[in-house]
Image (cartoon, rainbow, N blue to C red):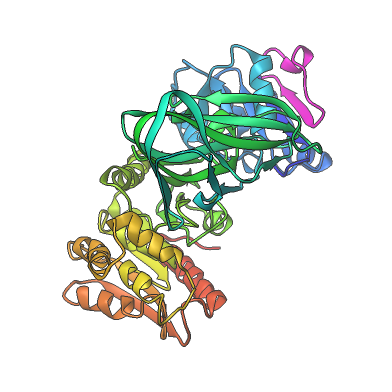
């Protein structure tokens, strides 16, 4: 549901909550008793309702009454009381189809209030980069800016919490949508930090209305700002102790509170270094295949490819990479990469699928994720456009092949190898090939479109072919003249055409 439009909530139960629960102006309440039949199609048309914001069930078996409402119900928006037992296969199927959630609804007023505040369709996020950090005068320790990757401080900060730095610019918080705040940081055990948020009156710069301080424990989860009053938000960091403190981006994203990250039902994979990958699973029709799409480089934080994948009808997973300026090719710590594999395997298990029920895909930066994690699954197919696999070469090509274009590749090189050097280039290239040479792509289809004069990674296509030469893999390829960022619409059209052909030819899907 778009921001500012009516939110339609359907309740099925013996007691109509709307008679006792306060509703906000944008909420429209639809109440049904269990088992009562109605002409749902006519009702939706008469009231011009395309989508319900949420469905509240008194009992989990009441989901059987939703059969005619299903097209108007998005996954993750159906709720039933925690502790309910699922006793039939059809109830279990519908719960899986809509990813219905067991929820504590013991306080109806609070629950409905949260639905009104946090359930909406919009997604957006961005970041304050490390270049916006301003250290207070008088700090006698060292300060090092490592590209756009991190700001490193080292020294003595004092025995008590002391303001050390602030972000130069305020965040304009409109109050219409809540936001999540997430700070990337690493520190020595001898250093303690806490983040302070200053609420400055809207239209009156410098007028402090209030401030909140968040401990390291608070920051283990995103900080939720849900005030309905607009503010300018200022951010500063207090530090105590002695040692090294490494700061990354300060992320700010539309918040869906307890209902998801970036989207209702969205999730974020995080490691001990506070590095993140975003992920969203849509159950589709619960039938093979499981389509997995890795987003390309994306400065705006959020999920790419939702409507494209949804139009195929099958279950799908979207991955995104919000690190640095728009992604770091889905590589990370062993912990973070392990979470990617575990998430995919978990969804395969839930769906009852095998590895040959998987199609991995991506464009540009996303091709790395599709190929890299494809090794872990030996899938039915991998569909990619504009492959990039020699990430070290992308950084090395910056000076002569792409002057001043995609400079964040140097940040990736440093983030993933700890150095900017020829040795680092070789090491980062090897990170892909050391894994890819272990691939077992027997009976896997590789559909690949590439640019003939790719100025990011010109060797990707021939090297992939060479590596797979002795494997019984089927390859469909297409080339276009031009550099990496040319002919994007042509490549995307070809990419999606291959997807649709695989769906129809190999899985009996049409339309």
Instruction: Tell me the quadrant of the picture where the C terminus can be found.
Output: bottom right
- Is 123 placed above or below 80 here? below
Q: Nearer the viewer, residue 313 or 431?
A: 431
Q: Is residue 456 above or below residue 213?
A: below
The percent coordinates of residue 294 (x first, y second) are 43, 57
Q: Which residues are magenta?
A: 13-34
Q: Is residue 481 within the magenta segment?
A: no
In which quadrant of the rendered view does residue 199 lie?
A: top right
At x 61%, y 45%, the residue is 168
Q: Is residue 436 left or right of residue 264?
A: left
What is the residue that sits farthest to the bottom in this orientation?
481
Which residue shows up at 47% across the image and 71% down it? 495
Query: Quarter of the image containing the N terminus?
Result: top right
Q: In the image, residue 259 lies at what x, y percent?
A: 56, 32
Who's the residue at 40% across and 52% down the image?
288
Q: Quadrant of residue 367?
A: bottom left
């Amino acid at each position: 549901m778009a921001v500012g439009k009516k939110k339609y909530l359907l309740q099925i139960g013996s007691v109509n909550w709307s008679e006792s629960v306060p509703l906000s102006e944008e909420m429209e309440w639809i109440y049904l008793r269990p088992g009562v039949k109605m002409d749902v199609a006519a009702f939706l048309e008469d009231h011009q309702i395309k989508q319900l914001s949420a469905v509240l069930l008194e009992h989990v078996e009441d989901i059987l009454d939703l059969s005619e409402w299903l097209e108007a119900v998005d996954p993750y928006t159906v709720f039933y009381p925690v502790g309910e037992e699922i006793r039939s296969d059809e109830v279990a199927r519908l719960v899986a189809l809509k990813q219905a959630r067991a929820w504590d609804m013991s306080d109806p007023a609070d629950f409905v209030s949260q639905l009104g505040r946090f359930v909406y369709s919009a997604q957006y996020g961005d970041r304050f980069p490390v270049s916006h950090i301003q250290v207070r005068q008088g700090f006698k320790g060292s300060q090092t800016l490592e590209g756009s990757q991190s700001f490193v401080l080292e020294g003595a900060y004092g025995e008590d919490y002391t303001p050390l730095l602030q972000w130069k610019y305020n965040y304009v918080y409109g109050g219409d949508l809540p936001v999540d705040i997430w700070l990337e940081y690493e520190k020595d055990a001898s250093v303690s930090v806490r983040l302070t948020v200053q609420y400055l009156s809207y239209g009156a710069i410098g007028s402090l209305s209030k401030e909140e301080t968040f401990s390291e424990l608070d920051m283990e989860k995103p900080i939720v700002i849900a005030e309905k009053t607009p503010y300018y938000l200022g951010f500063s960091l207090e530090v105590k102790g002695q040692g090294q403190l490494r700061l990354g981006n300060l992320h700010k994203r539309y918040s869906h509170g307890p209902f998801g990250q970036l989207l209702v039902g969205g999730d974020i994979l995080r490691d001990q270094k506070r590095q993140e990958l975003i992920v969203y699973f849509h159950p589709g029709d619960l039938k093979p295949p499981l389509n997995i799409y890795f987003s390309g480089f994306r400065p705006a934080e959020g999920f790419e490819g939702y409507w494209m994948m949804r139009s195929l009808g099958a279950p799908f997973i979207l991955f995104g990479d919000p690190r640095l300026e728009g992604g770091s090719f889905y590589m990370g710590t062993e912990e973070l990469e392990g979470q990617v594999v575990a998430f995919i395997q978990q969804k395969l298990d839930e769906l009852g699928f095998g590895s040959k029920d998987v199609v991995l895909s991506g464009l540009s930066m996303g091709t790395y994720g599709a190929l890299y994690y494809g090794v872990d699954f030996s899938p039915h197919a991998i569909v990619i456009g504009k492959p990039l696999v020699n990430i070290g070469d992308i950084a090395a090509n910056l000076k002569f092949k792409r002057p001043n274009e995609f400079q964040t590749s140097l940040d990736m090189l440093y983030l993933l190898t700890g150095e900017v050097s020829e040795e680092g280039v070789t090491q980062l290239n090897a990170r892909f090939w050391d894994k890819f040479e272990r691939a077992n792509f027997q009976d896997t289809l590789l559909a690949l479109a590439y640019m003939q004069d790719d100025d990011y990674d010109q060797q990707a296509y021939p090297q992939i072919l060479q590596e797979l030469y002795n494997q019984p893999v089927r390859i469909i390829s297409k080339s276009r003249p031009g550099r990496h960022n040319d002919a994007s619409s042509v490549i995307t059209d070809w990419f999606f055409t291959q997807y649709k052909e695989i769906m129809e030819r190999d899985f009996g899907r049409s339309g």
